[in-house]
Amino acid sequence: MHKNILLLILYLLLSACSSLPIAYITNQGSDTVSVVDIKNKKVTHEITVGKGPVGIAISLKQSYGFITNANDGSVDVLDLHKNNLIKKIKVGGTPVGITKSTYEDYIYVSDWVNNEIFIIETKSLTVFKKITVGKSPSGMICDNKGKYLFISNRDENTIEIYNQFDLSLIKKIKVGNHPYGIFFRKDLLFVVNVLDNSISIVDTNTFNLETIKVGDHPYGVVSDVKNQFIFVTNTQDDDISVVDLKKKKEIKKIKVGGNPEGIDIDEINNLLITSNWRSDSISIIDLVKQEYLYEIKTGKQSRSFGQFIKID
């Protein structure tokens, strides 16, 4: 009896320590989402979704994946346990950017043609509100305290900061030319400026801003858990810029697949993953050594704009 209990405890401990990273990759050219087992280097499922899937947000609370379909005005909801489509939510317009609220009660979806944000309740899977924002809203992310929603407005060169509680506008800040992908960590907001080949860094306590040059046509950005380095996908250089935040400059470039767009970070296994639009693949990078590891083929025109890694 005691032996069985000990074995059960050991099993539970081992299960808790296991961390299998799964990447959910939107493929705009094949209208699918590739479910990729990173450790075993293979696609395990190919899920058919709406037309022109671009953005993705993962809600761990419900184990749902939310996909923006830019070409048919919808958001698809995936069951991440069964890896199948369970609901299509019609929102209209051209949904591109997507993110979850801090406590995963809501999903925010940007319509960059009509300059609106749709708010989906994750419990009922229905749109219950929408707000008007800046011109061509693109990237979005929330802070970790439930305070802010950040939005990049591509065609007016601004970011907007909204109160998550009542969606009131707190601040609008001018950044570089064509801001797109954004990321938040430890009171710093990182914004890529596509046509300036730069990244803007906003201190969310003071709203002070500084700019650092990166590669050609940057799209996505993440930082490491300590905010020592930021990693930026350069779509026209087929590489990632590594920026040292202390030195405030690019220190290295890592070659990846063709036209890297989306980027996400697996902090548990120390991996970076990029989705590569031209080479229909994802690239895996060792976060500690800052070195390219390998590539995995996915669907056609892979984008995954947002946070797309789930740790099992």
Image (cartoon, helix red, strand yellow):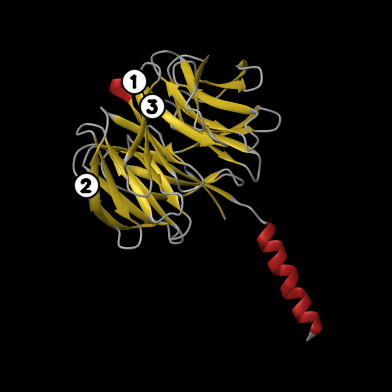
Question: Which residue does the numbered mark 1 point to in the structure image?
Answer: 157
Alpha carbon of mark 3 to alpha carbon of mark 2: how far?
Answer: 21 Å
Relative to 192, is 280 above or below? below
Question: Which residue does the numbered mark 2 point to in the structure image?
Answer: 91
Q: Residue at x 81, y 80 (%)?
A: 3
Q: Residue at x 24, y 54 (%)?
A: 128
Res 103 visible: yes
Q: Of the residues under marks 1 and 3, which one precedes in the sequence? A: 1
Q: Quadrant of the N terminus?
A: bottom right
How many residues crowd around disc 1 within 10 Å: few (fewer than 14), some, or many (20 or more)? some
Q: Amino acid at mark 1?
A: Asn
Q: Quadrant of the C terminus?
A: bottom right
Alpha carbon of mark 1 to alpha carbon of mark 3: how far?
Answer: 9 Å
Question: Which residue does the numbered mark 3 point to in the structure image?
Answer: 180
Q: Residue at x 45, y 38 (%)?
A: 298
Residue that extends furthest to the bottom in the rendered view of this protein: 1
For residue 288, side relative to residue 303 (left or right): right
Q: Considering depth in this image, is 43 or 245 the residue closer to the camera?
A: 245
Alpha carbon of mark 2 to alpha carbon of mark 1: how far?
Answer: 25 Å
Relative to 274, is 34 above or below? below
Image spot of residue 76 (x, y percent): 31, 50
Q: Amino acid at mark 3?
A: Tyr
